[in-house]
Image: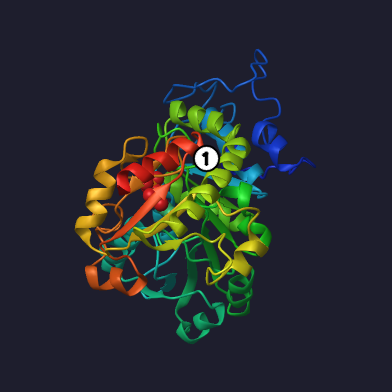
Amino acid sequence: MLKHNAHTTLAIKQKPMKFNTKTIHGGQENIDPAYGSVMPPIYQTTTFSQSTPGGHKGFEYSRSGNPTRAALEKSIASIENGKFGLAFGSGLAAIDAVIKLFKPGDEIISTNDLYGGSYRLFTSIFENFGIKFQFIGMGKAKNIEKYINKNTKLLWIETPTNPMMNIIDIEAVSKIAKAHNLLLAVDNTFATPYLQQPLELGADIVMHSATKYLGGHSDVVMGSLVVNQKKLAEKLYFIQNASGGICGPQDCFLVLRGIKTLHLRMQRHCENGEAIAKFLKTHPKVGKVYWPGFEDHLNHDIASKQMKGFGGMISFTTKEDTLKSATALVEKLKVFTLAESLGGVESLAGHPASMTHASIPKEERAKTGVVDSLIRLSVGIEDEEDLIADLKQAMG
Ligand SMILES: Cc1ncc(COP(=O)(O)O)c(C=O)c1O
């Protein structure tokens, strides 16, 4: 039976606030009853005193729950328009908790274009425990139905996908999930709740690598889940506590601080993203540019329907279409940093085939377009002129 921790699994009551207000105040009422601090104290403690066995004030041991983590979990639930939030030590720890809802023989259908680490977790860890995965194109939601069978339990989607920026119609997929009694989980890392709120579109679980835009400053690795159903929240809380993939209070404080400027940062990420996508599209040394804001993007209409903007993530190939040309380009960048990760204030460039997606076999990568000349940009919030000048000089 679940040992209920009131602070962690208590449903937050969504206040009638708009999004920007929620990033600052959502779920943060009475955050420090002792002194009224505006930010929650960092409860750097493993344990909490009890007056009598079991007589605690809501927290007993920091794996089961910690007040700083509870403040963050409520904030994340609030901005995703959900009831229950859970924070983990990384995005992958959050995904790991979701998959642990299932047992040998269960099947999961995932999009075939997804973060390499998620693919690795599914195929190299969970397949060993008898959970089966199918990786399919979900650009057309209808395509999913023919892969569903009596063992299917979960649809796992990322949208926009990493790194090809494919868009999946969350509402259409959620209708399919409901018709077949399946759970739908959405990795909302690229879009953030500022641009897209999957629970509102019918998803059951929304997942984040909070390492990225939620934290926003490239200084914390963290993951999160938000759900609306109490039973599901309790199961996930049980797994969070039983498996122990939690995050520390200092990190929770930092992500909570990051969330307070999410809306402002996302506005600038979107503006700079648009400027750079348009610059790349006309540059003679660039091949294909993948960004959902372009009208000729395969699912631009769906992106326009379910997202408030198109974000700051862009992938492109070099015109020469070789590993050498892509490597030469990223090595010359000076304002963009060549590095793994995304979603921070600083602009980053990555080479998916050898970095973030190296764990996916080359043949699998090729099927989805992750070729050797592909470069992924996480456009930061610097001045757009400096970013464009940097790309120009690097392309020569
Ligand atoms: C879309 C997406 N999901 C999940 C993850 C995993 O998150 P973390 O690195 O915090 O474990 C990443 C990391 O890059 C990601 O890009």
- Give, as a three-letter code, the residue at label 1: Leu
Is residue 119 visible in the rendered structure shown here? yes
Q: In the rendering, at what x and y percent does residue 46 appear? A: 41, 26
- Vertical order, 172 against 160 (above or below): below
Q: Is mark 1 within 8 Å of ligand 1?
A: no
Residue ID at (37%, 45%)? 392
**Residue ID for mark 1:** 214
Residue for point 55% across, 52% down: 191
Q: Nearer the viewer, residue 363 or 134?
A: 363
Q: What colouring method underlies this structural image?
A: rainbow
Question: Where 261 sits versus 343, above or below?
Answer: above
- Taking the view exactly as shown, the residue that stands out farthest to the left is 324
Q: Position of residue 320 (x, y in %)?
A: 27, 63
User: Which residue is situated farthest in the top direction here?
Assistant: 35
Answer with left or right where residue 390 lies relative to residue 237: left
- Residue at 27 percent across and 49 percent down: it is 329
Asked which quadrant contains residue 115, the reply is bottom left
Nearest to the observer: residue 233 or residue 178: 178
Task: Name which quarter of the figure residue 317 lies in.
Answer: bottom left
Q: Nearer the viewer, residue 389 or 66?
A: 389
Seen in the picture, residue 233 relative to 132 is either above or below; the reply is above
Residue 222 appears in view = no
| Image mark count | 1
Q: Position of residue 256 (x, y in %)?
A: 55, 32
Which structural element holds mark 1? loop
Pinpoint residue 288: horizontal percent, then vertical percent. Answer: 40, 65
Task: Check the image and name the residue furthest to the bottom.
Answer: 146
Q: Nearer the viewer, residue 396 or 323?
A: 396
Along the horizontal axis of the image, is 339 left or right of 80? left
Mark 1 is surrounded, within 10 Å at the Cα level, by few (under 14), some (14 to 19) or many (20 or more) other residues, namely: many
